[in-house]
Each structure stands twice: as structure tokens, then as C-alpha cells.
Amino acid sequence: LSRTKITSFHLPYNINIVHRSIHRQAAISSSALFLQKQKSSSSLTGWINSDTLNLQQATNQHERIKPDATSVAYDDNDTQIQYPSPSSVERLLIRDRLLFLKRDDCLHLPGSNISGNKARKFLSLNNLPAEQFPDAIVSYGGPQSNAMVALAAIVSSKNAELRDDRGSNGGEQMDLQNNGMAQDMFWELDVLDDEIQLRRKYGEEDENDSNNIGNSSTSTNTNETTDEPQKRFIYYTKPLPRYLRKNPNGNLLRALALGMEIRTLSHDEYSRLFGGLHGGSSLAPADLDPPVPGKSLWVPQGGACGIAKHGSDVLANEVIDYWTLHGKGMPLAVCLPGGTCTTALLMQRSLNAIMDQRRKEKEKAMDIRVVVIPCVG
């Protein structure tokens, strides 16, 4: 589960708590975020500059709800919460250490219904109105990526929003969410996955089920059959294993069902476009043309780019608000898993900015730092 562990003990500063690989990965993420700020205008590259998307305004359109003094759960609490309400916190005692688990796995964004740290990374994208949303989102990574299916869900929700604006039935899911009746949007896709597997098990496989999604020149696009304006999500990945081509499942099945167009590349071509000494860049490869010039947004693997900053600011404020009420002046270590380290890097930056502002306003100082747990390799 995507849970942020907030611990009330503070590690000694002379302990090296981050592996060398994490230091290097954090430096790469920091460099990538800097490079994005230097991004050329869309008139030169054909890609949207994320600075022009009013992401901050999109994030601020929902008034942040601060927790009250009773907003702590002492037992396991799987209650689903919708943004802008803050995610709940569980308090646990493990080996005589007090731990606070921030349940971002139970926090869901309106429209797309995504949760976890991807809900933080893509908060500002999710909150963009459909009419301001890019015509195409382009990204890359593994075929079972959480970021992949999160982006597919966001783009699908924008298409539903457009259909809703035109008075069609596509807005039914959004109406249910607004009435507090929303189900997990992936539930029906899980049922579809089970049905496909059962048909194959008993020899009733439909020829269209495998739909040759593994071919390098093939894309799967469910949006081409309609005349309505559609937002697109295009995803590049390495060649799919034979079993996954014939039996799409998990996040791949979900993303395809949500309208993702998959583009598979050879290992060499994939490495040429997205590899390199330090891994991928936040900038689109120079020889990768945008599908809709001037209206396409490049999102690097895992969402490791500047668009994640605004969701990080919201999370940092939630942590500050909670610890102000419940911390009793104790130091705090915020423990995060580290893949690209984007969340950890931005979280520390956001916390530093808030605490600096508190010092300027002569509020009580807080001792908060971020600890990264390496989850690479």
C-alpha cells in the first residue's frame, strides 16, 4: 500500500541513512526538475511548457481543509477520503517506537479516483479543467507502472468530463462521485480481467482479447471510433513478454481499458531515447515528435518532473498541520520509499519552505526531516 510513515523519533545526524544510489538518484531528480524550468517554449519544441498550464491555480481551486484536534485514528481505518480533505493518520506502537501512518492509499482524487503518492504527484494535472488539459499526454516506463495507470485514469476522466459537458452519458461516473456514491473505478476492470482469464482457461478466448499489443509499430487506441474531441495518453515501453501480450492483466489491462495508446520499442531504441548515463531526462527526447504539436505534454517516467511540486506542497502542509496539533514539540522524521526520489526531494523542499516562512513569522520552530528508504533494484 502507498503509505507515508511519519515517525516521532529522530535519527542521529551522524548516521548515514541513505544509500549511495539514492543520493545519486536524488541528484538526478533535482537536475531533472531544474532542466524543466529551462525548457524551451512550445513554439520551438512542439511540447507544452508545464509553466503555462496554471498548475498552481488548478491546485488552489480547492480550499485546503485543515485537520482538527480529533483527526487521528488509533486503529486500522480504511475509510475512503476524497481530496481536498487530508488523508487520515493511524497511530501505531512498534517495538516501543511511536509511528504515525499517513493513509494516502485511502485518499482519492475526484474524477480519476487515483490514490497513493501518484495522487500527490499528479494532483495539479488532475485538477486542470478538461478545456485547459493538454490534448495529449506522453510518457514512458514499465508495462505495469503505477504512474502509467494513474495518467491513463486522469486522461480518461477528462474525456468523461468533456462528454458530460456535451450532455452525454459519459458524465455519469462523475455525477456519482459528486454525490458521494463513487465506487473504485478499477473494480469493473478487475472483473473484466477475471472474465478474460476464465474464457482463456476454458478455451473461449476471443481473437480480439490479445489484440497484438506487443508489436512495436502497433498502438491501442479506444478513442479513434468517436468524432468527439478526445484527450490522448500515449505510452512508450519495451517489448512486452509473450505471456503479457496474450494475457494483458493488472495495470496494463487497466490502462488499456482506460484508453491508453501503447507504443512498444526495441530494447536498443528504448535505451537510445530514454536511457543514458544518468537515466531519463525530464525533457522529451529531441527526436521524439509531439503527437499534437503545441498541445502535447511530456511526463517523464514515474512523474519525476516539476508538475509534482504542487501536490508535494499540499502534502507538506498536511504534515505540518497534523504535527502542530499532535507533535507536542517533538522532532519528526518523515519516512518515504525512494524510487526516482521525486516525492522525497520535493517533500523536503516543501517542508523547508514552510518552516522558513514560520521562522520569518516568528512562529514556534519545528524539527522535521525526510528519511528515504531505497526501493530500487
Image: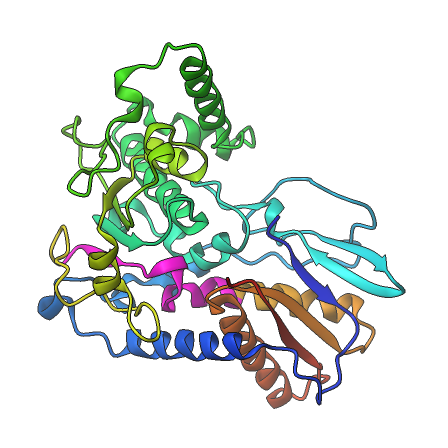
Report if residue 58 is visible in the image. no
In the displayed structure image, the side of residue 217 where residue 377 appears, left or right: right
- Percent across and percent down for residue 167 are 28, 26
Q: Camera-side residue: 186 or 376?
A: 376
In the displayed structure image, the side of residue 330 where residue 284 appears, left or right: left
Q: Residue at x 26, y 42 (%)?
A: 262
In the displayed structure image, the side of residue 71 where residue 26 appears, left or right: left
- Percent across and percent down for residue 251 are 43, 39
- Percent across and percent down for residue 222 are 24, 30
Q: How many marks?
A: 0
Rendered view: 329 above or below 74: below
Image quadrant where residue 16 sits: bottom right
Rendered view: 337 above or below 33: above
Q: Which span of residues is magenta-colored? A: 294-313
Q: Camera-side residue: 203 or 324?
A: 203
Check if residue 84 falls in the magenta segment: no
